Image (cartoon, grey):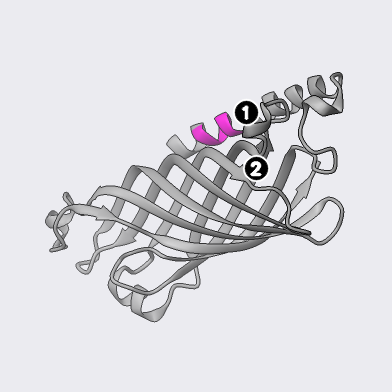
């Protein structure tokens, strides 16, 4: 339910961004961002993560919506807003399946992204985001386990232009899920309470509008 609410906020931000873009078209180009880079981009990719559950990996998909703020002081040019949604529910490695059967992680988050100037067709970026994460799995005793958390993440990567409006993206992310496992002792899980730190990469493409 939290993730559905967050996605609703995501589309509200997207609508606001499109309205702001329309207003930006009425001001001189010198006050906005780079004319060759439309501020709104939407894309998707394939993700591979280590969920920090004793090793192994899990695969899934990620959706990006990026909006670079078009009217900011020169020193801040390149700053923007990013929202993401991911669903990791496929391609579990055998080592992960033996420890956390049916593990699934899905999360939605948003925050600040900063893109550095182009180096030919390359554009590196960094980001900081917060959002809601949900984790489902089955304990060693066969009990169904579900937990939700406020997730924080840092990351970065590089975009590479292949056409005028199409960019390839290679993205890395490191997450923090706080206070995990503390209530799972009733299910026979012996790991003590503490944060888990999933991390992974996503490779995909974005289209700039």
Question: Residue 37 location, x and y as percent?
Answer: 80, 43
Instruction: Indicate the secondary structure of the residue bearing disc 2.
Output: strand
Residue identifier under label 1: 13
**Chief secondary structure of the magenta span?**
helix
In the image, 123: left or right of 202?
right
Q: Residues within 10 Å of mark 1 (few under 14, many from 20)?
A: some
Image quarter of residue 98 = bottom left
| Residue 4 within the segment the image draws in magenta | no
Quick one: 115 or 86, which is closer to the camera?
A: 115
| Residue 7 within the segment the image draws in magenta | yes
Q: Earlier in the sequence, mark 1 or mark 2?
A: 1
Image quarter of residue 168 = bottom right
Quick one: 101 or 27, which is closer to the camera?
A: 27
Answer whether labels 1 and 2 touch (C-beta < 8 Å). yes
Range drawn in magenta: 6-11
Is residue 5 depicted above or below 162 in this figure? above
Q: Residues within 10 Å of mark 2 (few under 14, many from 20)?
A: many
């Amino acid at each position: 339910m939290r993730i559905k609410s967050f996605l609703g906020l995501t589309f509200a931000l997207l609508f606001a961004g499109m309205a702001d873009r329309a207003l930006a078209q009425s001001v001189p180009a010198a006050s906005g961002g780079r004319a060759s880079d439309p501020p709104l981009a939407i894309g998707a990719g394939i993700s591979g993560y280590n969920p920090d559950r004793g090793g192994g990996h899990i695969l899934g998909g990620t959706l990006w919506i990026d909006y670079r703020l078009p009217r900011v002081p020169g020193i801040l040019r390149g700053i923007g807003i990013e929202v993401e949604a991911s669903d990791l529910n496929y391609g579990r490695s055998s080592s992960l399946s033996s420890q956390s059967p049916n593990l699934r992680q899905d999360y939605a988050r948003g925050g600040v992204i900063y893109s550095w100037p182009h180096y030919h067709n390359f554009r590196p970026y960094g980001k900081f985001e917060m959002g809601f994460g949900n984790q489902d799995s089955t304990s060693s005793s066969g009990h169904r386990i579900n937990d939700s958390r406020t997730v924080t993440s840092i990351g970065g990567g590089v975009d590479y232009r292949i056409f005028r409006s199409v960019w390839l993206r290679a993205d890395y992310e490191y997450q923090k899920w706080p206070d995990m496992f503390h209530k799972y002792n009733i299910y026979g899980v012996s790991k003590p309470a503490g944060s888990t730190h999933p991390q992974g990469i996503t490779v995909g493409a974005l289209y700039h509008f």
